[in-house]
Image (tube, rainbow, N blue to C red):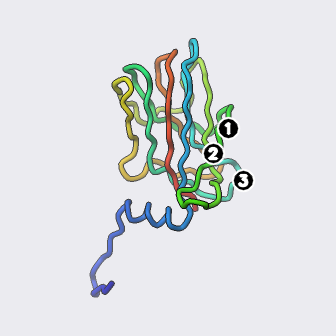
Amino acid sequence: MRQNLGTALTVTATDKWLSYIQAGQAFVLGARMAAGAGVINHVQLFNPVGSGKTVLARRVIVSCSVVDGLDLNIHNAALATDAGAGINMLSGGAAGVAHIRTQQNAAELGTVVSPVSNPALTPFVHGGDWLFQLAPGQGALVCHFTVNENLNGTWFWAEF
């Protein structure tokens, strides 16, 4: 590419995401949680303490079984159940350092950043280009705010 003096180049979020995938730095993983009596389900992207990596959350796709509100929250304590390390979007690449974690709790966890209302069984995508940058020991989660329903959440992120 030729660039003239005074010309600025712009890299789109899609271009950057493709470069993360091709470099083996893009990851995805989700969790499906069944309804529980009197509890709210949470699905978290967590960058473990001591990981040595920065996690850049691109988006999360979330759905639940009934018409409800879905919250996107910051929560910097690891949830109780480890659903696994991120799957590398470069087929055959190493697993991510960040993990998807889940927990059922009687009350909503974390600090609400973005609440939305969502029709039943309709996936909602949080994140236009990017959501959060998470240092080691930090996390973000999605949850519904009515008890007794299922929750599906799939996170997409990069690590560098």
The answer to whether residue 94 is left or right of residue 74 is right
- The residue identified by callout 1 is 82
- The residue identified by callout 2 is 99
The picture places residue 94, in percent across and down from the top left corner, at: 64, 59
Q: Give the residue at the far top of this rendering.
A: 37
Q: Nearer the viewer, residue 110 or 89?
A: 89
The answer to whether residue 27 is left or right of residue 8 is right
Q: Give the residue at the far right of this rendering.
A: 50
Q: Nearer the viewer, residue 94 or 140?
A: 94
Q: Nearer the viewer, residue 66 or 160?
A: 66
Kind of element beneath mark 1: strand
The picture places residue 33, in percent across and down from the top left corner, at: 56, 27
Residue at image coords 51%, 52%? 157
Kind of element beneath mark 2: strand
The picture places residue 134, in percent across and down from the top left corner, at: 56, 50
Whether residue 76 is situated above or below residue 118 in the rendered picture: below
Q: Which mark is residue 103?
A: none
Residue type highlighted by circle 2: His
